[in-house]
Amino acid sequence: MAAKNKNRSKVNLSEVAKAAGVSKMTASRVLRNASGFSDETRDKVLEQVERLGYVPNRIAATFGSEQTSTIIGVCVPHLSSSLFGAVLDSTNGALAKFGYQTMIGAHENSPETEEMWVKNILSWRPAGLILSGHTHTRTTRELIKSQGIPVVEIWNLNTSPIDISVGFNHFDCGHEMALYILGQGHQRIGYVGADSAAPGMGALRRKGFVAALKSSSTDLAAQEILNDRSGFYAGFYGTENILNRVGDLDAIYFQDDAMAIGGIFYCQSQGMSVPEDIGIAGWGSMEAASVLPQRLTTTVVSTQALGKTAAEALISRVRGEPVNDVIITPTRLAPGNTI
Amino acid sequence: MAAKNKNRSKVNLSEVAKAAGVSKMTASRVLRNASGFSDETRDKVLEQVERLGYVPNRIAATFGSEQTSTIIGVCVPHLSSSLFGAVLDSTNGALAKFGYQTMIGAHENSPETEEMWVKNILSWRPAGLILSGHTHTRTTRELIKSQGIPVVEIWNLNTSPIDISVGFNHFDCGHEMALYILGQGHQRIGYVGADSAAPGMGALRRKGFVAALKSSSTDLAAQEILNDRSGFYAGFYGTENILNRVGDLDAIYFQDDAMAIGGIFYCQSQGMSVPEDIGIAGWGSMEAASVLPQRLTTTVVSTQALGKTAAEALISRVRGEPVNDVIITPTRLAPGNTI
DNA sequence: AAAAAGCACGTTACCGGTAACTCAATAGAG
DNA sequence: CTCTATTGAGTTACCGGTAACGTGCTTTTT
C-alpha cells in the first residue's frame, strides 16, 4: 500500500497481451475496435485490461501513427468572456463527442500572442486548429500552411479563409441595425465600443452600421471606442464619455449587449429614460438582457451554434469529408423596447 | 506549389542535426537548452532550425521520456461561466507561462462525466490535473491514485484533499453573511440557489448561512433551489417562486451575484424596492454588479487568484518542490446598499 | 609531470504503440 | 475435390525524440 510513485502503473499493452495469451498487435486491435479478432479473444483481452487496470497511452499511439492524432487546438481572445465561453463550451462538447481533446489558448487580441500559441500547439501535432478572427501574422499563416493542417477560422465571416471559415456576418448585423434605428425615427446616433486594440471584434459591425447610415445620408454623430475589454462597466463608462462630449444623441449602438446594458444603467443613473430620451441597441443576445425590465433591442446570435458548427466542420475536414469553405452562422435582429 | 498534404513538413531533428554537422543528441541538447555544447555549435544548430523550419515534436519528446510531460488537464463544471471562465483564464495563463499546455474538460456537475474525462485525460500522460470540487467517483479517485499523478482540487476548501486543495471557505462566507444580514435587523430570511443536481457548488455557503442563523435562534424562512444552471434568469425566476410561496420575506441570500441581480430585477418588476421592502445579498463579485444603481451586498472573491494559485501549486508539486496541501483563497464580505 | 576533473560531443538503447505485411486455418465457389 | 477468398491471428519495422553512458581532448590540481 506504500504510495510508491515509482510504481506508476506501468502496465502496458504488452503485459495485457501476454496476460491474455495473445500478441500485442491483437490486443491493440481489440482496444481500437479494429477488425480481425474473435469474440472470444476480445473478451480475454478486455478481461485483462480490467484486471490489470490498463490505461491506454495516447501519446505513444499518436507518436506511432501521427495521422491518428486526436488533439485539436482552440484559440480564442479570452477564456473568460460570455461570448467566447459559450463558443468554447460548445466546441469542446462537440469535439469530445467525436473523441477529440481540446488544447486551449488565449491570444488576448494580439496576433503575436496567437503566433506564439500556434508555434507551441503545432509541436503537439494536432489534427486541426480553430482560430478566432482572421487577423494573423504572416508567420502564423506560413506555419499553418507548411504543416498542411486543417484550420477553421471562427467568429468573422471570411470569404477567403486559410482553410475554412465559420462566422457571423458582422457587417450585415451593423447594417441592418442602422436601418432599423433610422426607421424608428432616430437621427443623432452614436457608437460605443471597446477593444480598440483589437480591430477585429466589433469593427465590422461598426463599419456596416456606418455604411448604412451613409446610404441614408446620415453620419455617425459620435463614437467612443475604449481601449479596454468589453463589459458592463466599459459600456457604462463609455456612455458617460460619449454623452459628456455630445449631449444631444438620441440613440447609441453598442458593440455588444454587455456594453449596452452598462449604457442603460448609466442613462438610468442620470435620470434619462430609455427609449424616450435615448435609444439603445446591442448585439449578441446576452443572458443578462433577459432580466432587464425592458427588452433590449439587439441582434440575436447563437455562439453555441457557431462553436458546434466549427467543430463539426473541422472534424469533417480532418476526416477528408467534403465541407463548405465558408459557413455563415445566422443572426436575427430582435426588436425590443429600448429603441 | 501543389498543396501536397503528403509533404507535411517532415523535417525532424535528425535532418537538422545532419545539416548542422552534429549528432541528433547535440541538436536535442541545444533545443532544450541543456548544457554540453559550445556557443558555436548552438549557432549552427539554431541556424538550421530556422532555415529548415523545424517544428519540434512534443509528442515524441513526451513519449521518449514521460517525466517531461507538459500537459495539464483542467476540468471545470462549465466553460461558459463567468466564475469558472475567470478561473480557467488565470489557470491557463499561469500554466502557459511555465511552458505547460492545458487540456480542458467540462463535467457539467456530474461525477460520472468527470470520471469519463479523467479516464480519457490520463491516457495523455499529463504531468498533473486540476479538478473542481471534491465530489468524485470512487473510480476517479482510484485511477488518479494508481497513476500517482499530482492533483489540485479547486473551488471548495477541502481539509482532506486527494493531494492539494485550493479553495474558498464557502461555509464561512455563508456564515458571515448570515450574521451580517441579521445584524442589519432582518428576520424573515430566504435562500435562492440553483444547480440542485450539483450539491457541491453553493451548498456549503447555504450550510454556513443556515448554521449562523441557527446560532442566533433563527430559521431559514424559505428556500428555493432550482434544478437549473445559475444565472440572471434563474435568479429572477427563483425569486418569483419563493416570493409567491412566502410573501413576507424581508431578505434573500442568493447563491451568487448573477442570481442576486436577477432577483433585484424581479423585485423591481413587482414594484418592490431594495432594500426597503426586501434585502438582497449575493456572492462572487460579478462585474455586472458594478453597474447597478445600487451597490450589491456580496462577498468579494478573486477567481483569478484561485486559478493562479492552483496552477502554481500544481507546478510546484510536479517539480517536487514543497507545497502546502491546503490553501485558502481569501474572501471578504463587502457591504453594499441592498441590505 | 602525472593524475584528476571538466567539457563537448557521439553512441546506444529504448519509450509503447500501430501500419503493413505474412501466414495458417477455414469457408465458399465452381 | 480443388482453388480461391476470408478470417484471425502473429511478425517486423518504425515513429522522433531523450537518458545514460562512453570517448577523446583540454584544463586544473597537487
Image: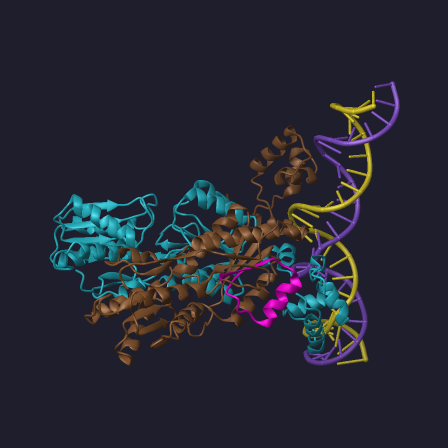
Chain colours: A brown, B cyan, C yellow, D purple
Position in image of residue A267 (x %, y %): 24, 70
Quarter of the picture containing the C terminus of chain B is bottom left
Q: Looking at the image, which is closer to me, B117 or A115?
A: A115
Position in image of residue B148 (x %, y %): 52, 50
In the rendered structure, does residue A146 fall within the stretch colored magenta? yes
In the rendered structure, does residue A207 fall within the stretch colored magenta? no
Residue A165 against residue A28 in the figure, above or below: below
The single residue placed furthest to the front in the displayed view is A216
Position in image of residue B173 (x %, y %): 26, 56
A142 vs B222, left or right, is right
Q: Quadrant of residue B323?
A: bottom left
- Please give the range of residues in magenta: A131-156
Q: Looking at the image, which is closer to me, C11 or B5?
A: B5
Q: Looking at the image, which is closer to me, B265 or C8?
A: B265
A288 vs A119, left or right, is left
Which residue is found at the position 63% from the left and 44% from the top?
A12
Which residue is found at the position 32% from the left and 73% from the top?
A189
Residue B330 against residue A216 in the figure, above or below: above
Q: Quadrant of residue B81?
A: bottom left
- Residue B220 appearing in the image: no
